[in-house]
Amino acid sequence: MILTGHIPPSKTILSRAEEMEIPILSVDLDTLTTVEIIDQAFGQVRLHEPIKVECMFQMTEEYIDCDRLVECLGLGG
C-alpha cells in the first residue's frame, strides 16, 4: 500500500495492514505525481529477456500469496 501526501495512517489502518501482512510505503508526493513516477518506472522495464521474466515469476511465487490476495480482494469464486 502506498500512502501519498505524507499523511500518517490511522492506527486502525496500520493495525489492519499488519494483520493482513500488507507493507506500507509512505511518500511526501501527491497521488498523481506518485502514480506518474510508478508508471514511468514500469514503462521502462523491458521483459523481452527470458531471464527477467523468470526472475519475476520466482519473486512472485516467493513473495506473493496469490490465493490470499484473490481472497482479500473478494475475487474468488
Image (spheres, helix red, strand yellow):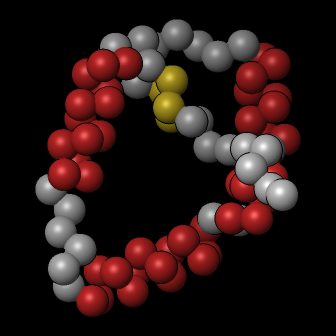
Report the side of 67 relative to 32 (left or right).
right
Residue 61 is situated, as x and y percent measured from the top left of the image, at: 60, 77
Residue occupying the point 73% across, 44% down: 73
24 vs 57: above or below: above
Q: Is residue 21 visible?
A: no
The image quarter in which residue 22 lies: top right
**Which residue of the protein is positioned furthest toward the front in this rendering?**
77
The vertical placement of 22 against 29, above or below, is: below
Asked where in the image residue 9 lies, by quadrant, the reply is top right
Q: Is residue 53 above or below residue 64?
A: below
Horizontal relation, residue 11 to residue 53: left or right? right
Label total for image? 0
Please tell me which residue is depicted at 54% across the width and 71% down the height of the picture: 60
Q: Is residue 59 left or right of residue 12?
A: left
Residue 6 appears in the rendering: yes
Q: Locate residue 16, reporting x and y percent.
A: 81, 31
What residue is shown at x 39% (from left), y 81% (from top)? 55
Q: Give the residue at x 72% y 13%.
A: 10
Which image quadrant: the C terminus? bottom right
Q: Quadrant of the N terminus?
A: top right
Relative image position of residue 64 (x, y in whole percent): 63, 64
Most foreground residue, 1 or 10: 1
Left or right of 10 on screen, residue 27: left
Percent coordinates x, y for residue 69 in the rendering: 71, 54
Residue 53: quarter of image: bottom left
